[in-house]
Image (spheres, rainbow, N blue to C red):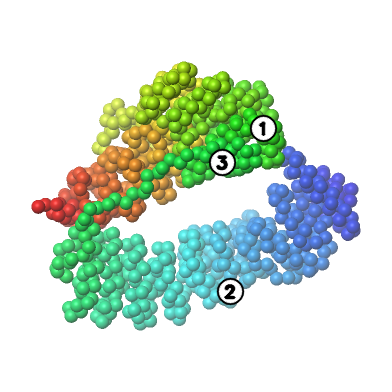
Amino acid sequence: MNDLLTAVRAGAHREVPALVLGLDLAGRRAALAELKGLRKEARGWDWRRQDKVRKALLVAGAGCHTGAAGCATWIGGRDLRSWSRSPYPLILTALGDRDPAWLGDLAHRLAGRSTASEAEYTFISELVRLAGCPIPTTDSLVEGWSERISTGRWHGRSGRVPLIGVLRADPHVAVLAPRLFELPELPAPVGWYDTPDSSDHWPAALRALAEEGVLDRSRLVERCVSRLVRGGKTGDQRFFLTVLQQLGVTEDEERTHLRDWAGMAADGISVVASHAQDVLARLEARGELSARELAEVSGPVLFRREKKLVRGQLILLGKVLGRDASTAGELLPVVAEVFGNEDVALQERALKLIARHLPADDAPLREELSLAAAQLGPVHREAVTALFGVVDGPDPVAGPYEEMLPPVPVPSRLAPAPQDVAELVEEVAAQVKSRSWQGSTPGALAAASGISAFERTLDGLVRVARTDRAGLAQALREALAGEWFIEHGIERQPEPAYMTTGHALALVVGSLLDRLSDETIAEGKTRWTGTGTCAHAALNGVLIARAWEVAGAVRFDRVPFLLATPTWHTGSLDAAELVERLRTYQLLGVAPGPADFSQALLRVRRTGEQTSAEAAAALGTPEGDRLAAWIRADEPVAPVLRHGLTSDRPSAGNWWQRSTSGLRHVLLATRERLVIQQEFPRSFHWLGRPHVPDARECYHWGAEQYPHWTATLPEDGETLAAWLMPDLLRTADEGPRGGAWSLPPLMETGGEAGVALHLALAYGLGARHPEDRISAVDALLVLAAQGRLDTALLGRELGVLVDHDLVKVNRLADSARTAAATGAYRTVLGVLAGVLPTLLAYEKAPRGIGDLLAVAAECAEHCGTEGIEPIDGLAATAGRKGSSQTVRQAARLHAAIQAHGDRESP
């Protein structure tokens, strides 16, 4: 036993199997107890010592376990899994004296674990071979098998082996291949292939195995159909469709799965729905789809947004109606559902189809269809009147129009700081151990609650450290045991580029627990953190300055509480409340911390707070005088300069840039604020300097990692929007997902909503990723609900961005459609009325303008055009020859505007 332990401590893993086999049952049990102790001891070692013994410890422990359950748990231990070369051959050798039943039990237990890799599969398959038992079929094992098959296609210099050859040689393919269709998601090696018609990919190989009788073809068809009906990731759906097409579905199978094709046509992704639509057409052509069934199938398809699918279904319905006029009663009402589609061309096609096949002697059907036609817009009024006469349907614009906007966000007050040790420690532990401390993304929705919790916890640490320092320190040590900075101390100061609220709390807790020296704290407090060349580092520098100051405060019990703790969840601070806090400081003879007081000034509400200014001045303290002057000035932290651009050409002297890639960047500069440079700590000076915008991407992490930014300047949304504009510019170009997280919180900040907020919103509405466009739409609706949205200004900014190729029209159309779907028709129409003249003036219509005109027309049909400025170029576009989407939708919008004008005429 001693030789085994010596070999493990030396990391001699190759010697371990022979040493294990040389032990009897009692010796293995005794050795296992020692190995468990060594494993626990090794967790406290540095990573180099751990790496040295890890593989030997894994092999020895597996060989010394006498039960299969314990052996499987040992092998699956996460702390023993970091290795480059697989240790499993050594484990197999160490288990060489076990009986087959024991090995089979181990194989099935390992297969039931969540680990999935080629190495695990190879190990388990070898255990199965030795045990002579069936191969397990768990999800993780199937994934590992697929990796093994993929790797087996490469054999050194011989190059790539055809996939079908590898599968034919695999002893478990007949059992494991069908399980691919039952996994929640396809393994990556299976779902990837060059082209669907390639002969050397999984779909083709599965077809070949079915043709050879290795796999049951009918079962594969059933499973493909089942997966396509169930839905899932787009890549997986394309794979199962390709397999289905490779297998070739018979007419009997098409007939058997009628309801499944209907479900795919209604809910499948476009390519799946198109395939199902083709199958349904074949069924109808063979007389296996009745008129009633066709009507049931067609309704959901005609409701889809894909124009190609709707057009194809109308063609199929037209063929059936042309062959059998008696189906009009069943099918024409379904055709009329297209009247609700936003596409004018599809509406016109459906109307012509009804006009062609409407029976002259069916009064009830005519009445039903005339009621459906009432929802068509003014552009179809003439055709509807010719077909049905005057249609008395509902008028979307009749009566007073009411805009549907979300409730105005109401600021919520922060709860008092936790002053109970147990509650406070629970808050600290949750935040220090959270993902924000580890440097990953907390998400935009958690930003407000996250900053509220941080500020309350920071204030609570200051308060409780003053009243029960010993009890708080003991509770923190117990709650944070195992955290790196608790065990080893904070080795280096945090960098502004990567500062988070979790880092800030760690500094304060480290000070409380004496994990930071007095010299380190003094150095941190004097360190100038405002040298960053971008807003990210500057705003994070403010947080670092506050953190070091609070770390010193809790070490020496200097202050009873923090001045900068917000009043509301937005980060804003009530002026009267700050005055009372300063009065308490005055009574206690306590000097405010410079960073704490400076942050309080940046957060305090200034507008309409003259009474608080007088009360602050009456304190007779330097801080009271500064607060009074700050409120009375009521100036933004850094005034924003307008860019001076128009949507036709850049003017001289504006902030227009051309990057090295040739793209123009529309950004905003800010003026200096001398009072910040003269009276605030050095870490705040960047905020008061003049800044010319820079479109170069900084090296910092994504903006979504810093929810404390808006809470740093909660009363200066314009300034913050100007500084964060480069992030939003990249969001509209090639930036990562989540770049528009800041837009909804920005709309809740105080101050005016000027050009910066509107330009930021314009970038967001044209963002590259759909989730960012949704964030921008949320922000748009919030700003409109507050009554601060200038639709004309936003329209002009969008026109500037489109004109400088910074926003794509089709993305803007998607955002506009999303916003209009909420019921904010007048808001959307007001914005589009500002941007459409720019687009309509182009000699060549930009891609997506037809969709944008469609949204504008829909809005005008719902809310009318009251208060909307005339749209230059619309009449000329509507009067052009041709049937393009742009011309049709321009005619529709023009007709809606004229109809509203006729309604208002006496």
Residue located at (68% from left, 41% from top): 479
Whether residue 308 is situated above or below residue 539 in the rendered picture:
below
Above or below 863: residue 276: below
Give the image quarter of residue 64: bottom right
Front residue of 431 and 277: 431
Is any part of residue 485 visible from this angle? yes
Residue visible at 58% across and 25% down in the picture: 559
Q: CA distance from mark 1 to mark 3?
A: 28 Å
Residue beneath disc 3 = 436
State the CA–CA distance, disc 1 to disc 2.
Answer: 72 Å
Label 1, secondary structure: give it: loop
Three-letter amino acid code at the position of disc 2: Leu
List the residue tagged with mark 2.
215
**Which mark is first along the chain, 3 or 1?**
3
Along the line of sight, the residue nearer the viewer: 770 or 118? 770
Mark 3: amino acid:
Ser
Q: Residue 623: percent from the left, percent from the top?
A: 48, 20
Where disc 3 sits, the SS reads helix
What residue do we see at 70% from left, 40% from top? 478
The residue carrying pointer 1 sits among few (fewer than 14), some (14 to 19) or many (20 or more) residues within 10 Å by Cα, namely few
Residue 116 lies left or right of residue 60; in this view the side is left
- Amino acid, disc 1: Asp
Residue 421 image offset from top left, x and y in percent: 64, 38
Q: Is residue 30 above or below residue 179?
A: above
Which label lies toward us, 2 or 3? 3
Is 829 left or right of 538, judged from the image as shown?
Answer: left
**Mark identifier at residue 468:** 1
Q: Residue furthest left?
A: 906
With 378 as the anchor, is 487 left or right in this view?
Answer: right
What count of labels does the image hold? 3
Q: Label 2, secondary structure: give it.
A: loop
